[in-house]
Image (spheres, rainbow, N blue to C red):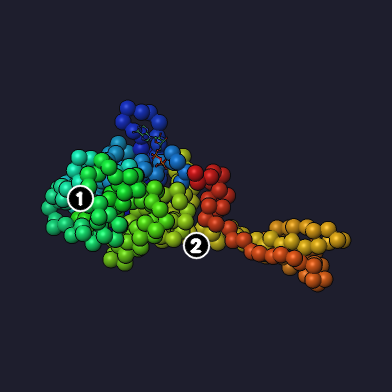
Amino acid sequence: MIAVENVFAKYPGTSVNIIKDVSFEVGEGEIFGFLGPSGAGKSTLQKILTGVLPNYQGSVKVLGSEVKNHSSDFYEEIGVDFEFPNFYNKFTAMENLNYFSSLYKKQSLDPIPLLERMDLLSDANKKVGGYSKGMKMRLGFIRCLLHNPKLLFLDEPTSGLDPANARILKDIVLEQKQQGKTIILTTHNMHDAEELCDRVAFIVDGAIKALDSPQTLRKSKENTSVEFSYIKNGIDKNKNVLLSELYNDMDFMNALKSSNITKIHSKEQSLEDVFIELTGRCLL
Ligand SMILES: Nc1ncnc2c1ncn2[C@@H]1O[C@H](COP(=O)(O)OP(=O)(O)OP(=O)(O)O)[C@@H](O)[C@H]1O
C-alpha cells in the first residue's frame, strides 16, 4: 500500500533536509503510527505521502505509484484529517461537508450518521466560524471519511477532544480498519499509538529511530519493575528492582521471610518509557 525508500526532503526555498533517509512499508489494512515529539517531522512525512510536498529524493510509492507523479484520481482514494482543519467559516457544517463531497467523482456517504456519532448533528446547520477547536476537529474527521477512501491519514485526530469524543473517534478508526482500510496515524499520544497501531515508527529529528509493533517495542526492553516498601531494623524503606532480579534481592527476600513487606506493586514500562530509552527524547 505504501513503500518509502531512502527518502530525504526539504521545504522549498530551504537548504536543510527535514526528513533524513527514511524507509518503511505499510501493508493493506494496517494502522501504522508516526510517533514523535513536536517538530520531529511527522506532519512533513504525511505531506510527502499525500503529495503535498513533492520536493523529495528517494522513492515514495503510495497505492502503487510514485507520489510525485500522482494522477488526480489519487485524491479519490485517500482521506486526510489535518491537524488544523480548514473550513469555510461562513458556511454551516453541512454546507461544508456537501461542498467537499462534491469535489469527488465518487458517491459520498451520508454524513448524518457520522455527524450523529461525533455529536455534531444538532450543530450541523450552524456556521463553522462559531465552532470550537474540538468541534472543528470532529468535523475534519468526518470530512476525511465521507468519500470512503482506501487510505486514511489522520494527523493528531484526538487533539482537542474530550475523552468521550476521543473514544468515539478511536472506535470509528478501528471500524475503518475492520473494513480493510489502511490508516496512517500521526501522534505524540502514546496511549493512542499503543491502542490503535499495529506498528509504530519512532521519529526524531526527521529520522526513524525504531519501528515495530508497540508490544514488541515494549518487550525489547526489560520492562517490568517491582516497587516495594518494607521495614528493616525498625525503619521504613522503599526499593525498586527489576522483576527478573527480585529473587536475588536480599532486602526483598529477607523482608518477605520476616513478613516485613508493607506495600508492593509491579510497574510495566510504557511505550513512552521505551521511546525515551531508545531515542533519548521525550514525546512532548
Ligand atoms: N513550511 C515549512 N517550511 C520550512 N520548514 C518547515 C515547514 N513546516 C515545518 N517545517 C519544519 O520542519 C520540521 C518538522 O516539522 P513537522 O511539522 O513535520 O513536525 P511534527 O513532528 O509534525 O510536529 P508537531 O507534532 O508539532 O506537529 C520542524 O523543524 C519545522 O520547523
Q: Quadrant of residue 166?
A: bottom left
Q: Quadrant of the N terminus?
A: bottom left
Q: Which residue: 28% across, 49% down?
A: 140
Task: Return the residue nearer the eye: 40 or 96.
Answer: 96
Measured as percent of width and height from the top left, residue 70 is found at: 21, 46
Label at residue 125: 1
Q: Left of 205 or right of it: where is 47?
A: left
SS at mark 1 in the image: loop
Give, as a three-letter code, the residue at label 2. Gln
Callout 2 crowding tier (Cα within 10 Å): few <14, some 14–19, many ≥20? few
* Number of numbered discs visible in the structure rendering: 2
Q: Residue at x 18, y 43 (%)?
A: 91
Q: Residue at label 2?
A: 215
Image x and y of residue 169, in percent: 34, 58
At 39% from the left edge and 58% from the top edge, which residue is drawn?
A: 164
Residue 53 lies left or right of residue 203; in this view the side is: left
For badge 1, the amino acid type reads Asn
Q: CA distance from mark 1 to mark 2?
A: 44 Å
